[in-house]
Image (cartoon, helix red, strand yellow):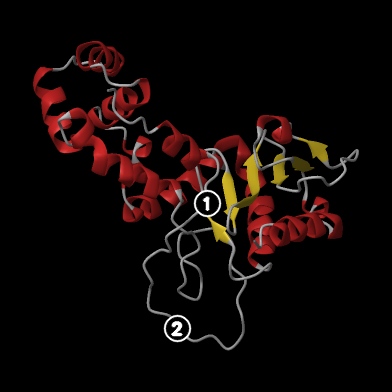
Amino acid sequence: MPPAKPAAARKNLRTRSKNSVTAGAVKRRPAKKPVKVLATSAVAVNGASLYSVHPGVAMIQKWIAELKGKTGRSVEEWMKHIHAAGPEDEKQCRVWLQAQYELGTNTAWWLAERAFGKAMGFAEDTPEAYLAVAPQYVAQMYAGPRQGLKPLHDRLIQLAQSLGDQVRICPCKTIVPLYRKHVFAEIKPASNVRIDLGFALKDEPFTARLNDTGGALKKNRITHRVAITKLTDIDLQVRRWLKQAYELDAS
């Protein structure tokens, strides 16, 4: 029987999931007034973690735990074997793992990526590793020609945090999903001059501004999106849609 594939875990880590593990607490300092936090680091001003561990981490950990029983080798044993007997090229290694050991496509890709040291490719192994790399995901998203979008991103994070203490911010490589029980919104730098703010709004009517993502047909949670190109785009209407999406995910 072919081994379990981590495809769902890897995909969910880039897109959306259902649970989260909170980051390790840093000693809190009392503040006289509440401080609004911008997404500039992994640690908020008052000592609380800005980011929560992505739900996909638990799925990856489950896959790792079951790997030896299904393939005969643990992750560490696969690494040693690949380094000792496998090809010296990552692409060839993937083909070799599939042909020689009948590993599934995604299992072979994941093991090959890890064997060839792509740290950003397997940062989801542990909660600690994910939290260490989450700020890098955000920094890379807004590097270079997209750095002008960072103030818009920060304002959206600030707005999301104002919705309630159940909001969880879990960056991926290309988007920053926002969770309550499930993903209810996502922030995506879509171009050098535009952020697409997506919402899980179910049957909310589409408008000239609130566009269809195609999510309903694809059975994705994010069904609507609005373009954000300047701070004034984050208006009362956008706040209402974000709050509505958050409240729809209460149960």
Quarter of the image for residue 203 reads top right
Give the image location of residue 95, x and y in percent.
29, 12
Quarter of the image for residue 90 reads top left
Give the image location of residue 51, x and y in percent.
49, 59
- The vertical placement of 44 against 151, above or below, is below
Q: Residue at x 25, y 40 (%)?
A: 66
Say whether residue 93 is left or right of residue 145. Answer: left
Instruction: Give the number of the mark in front: 2 or 1.
Output: 1
User: Which of the two labelled residues, at mark 2 and mark 1, occupies the earlier sequence position?
Assistant: 1
Q: Residues within 10 Å of mark 1 (few under 14, many from 20)?
A: few
Q: Residues within 10 Å of mark 2 (few under 14, many from 20)?
A: few
What kind of residue is marked 2?
Answer: Arg
Say whether residue 201 is left or right of residue 149. Answer: right
Q: Secondary structure at mark 2?
A: loop
Can residue 152 be seen? yes
Viewport quadrant of the C terminus: bottom right
- The vertical placement of 222 against 96, above or below, is below
Q: Residue at x 51, y 52 (%)?
A: 170
Q: Which residue is mark 1?
A: 18
Q: Are marks 2 and 1 in contact (CB under 8 Å)?
A: no
Q: Nearer the viewer, residue 32 or 186?
A: 186
Say whether residue 30 is left or right of residue 227. Answer: left
Say whether residue 28 is left or right of residue 210. Answer: left
- The vertical placement of 196 against 37, above or below, is above
Can residue 173 be seen? no
What kind of residue is marked 1?
Answer: Lys
Q: Which residue is mark 2?
A: 29
